[in-house]
Image (spheres, grey):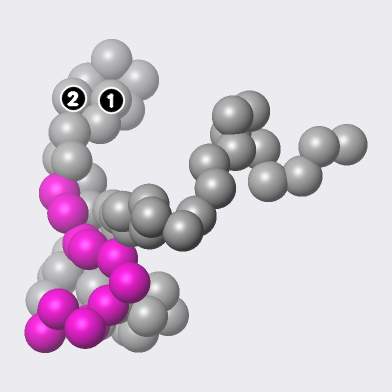
Amino acid sequence: MTFTDSQRDLPPIDRLEGFRPDGQSMHHQVMVAVLCGRTPITAWTYWMPCPPYAERFASGEWLRP
């Protein structure tokens, strides 16, 4: 998605994701470098550290067909 006004457009998405800027969230909002085709751009993403009690999926897939 592209935003014309991130100050206006991001808060509704933050609410949908359960992100609170005051730090009381399960995840963080971070800006990362990504490739759009071959063009590097910056993008916001929500990142959640892996809690110590969690199990990682080796395949990276939640469900296997």
Residue 53 vs residue 8, the one in the foreground = 53
Query: Which mark is on residue 40?
Result: 2
As shown in the figure, which amino acid type bears the numbered disc 1?
A: Leu
Give the quadrant of residue 3: bottom left
The residue that appears at 21% across and 83% down in the rendered structure is 24
Specify whether residue 61 is painted magenta: no
Please give the count of numbered marks on the rendered protein: 2
Measured as percent of width and height from the top left, residue 56 is found at 53, 41
Q: Is residue 43 found left or right of 22 in the rendered image? A: right
Please, which residue is most extreme toward the front here?
Answer: 53
As shown in the figure, which amino acid type bears the numbered disc 2?
A: Pro
- Report if the CB atoms under discs 1 and 2 are less than 8 Å apart: yes
The residue that appears at 54% across and 48% down in the rendered structure is 55
Label 1 element class? strand
The residue that appears at 31% across and 53% down in the rendered structure is 49
Label 2 element class? strand
Specify whether residue 29 is painted magenta: yes
Q: Is residue 55 found left or right of 1 in the rendered image? A: right
Provide the residue designation for mark 1: 35
Measured as percent of width and height from the top left, residue 1 is found at 36, 54
Give the extent of the magenta segment. Answer: 20-31
- What kind of secondary structure does the magenta stretch mostly adopt? loop
Residue 22's place in the image compared with 17, above or below, is below
The residue that appears at 28% across and 15% down in the rendered structure is 38
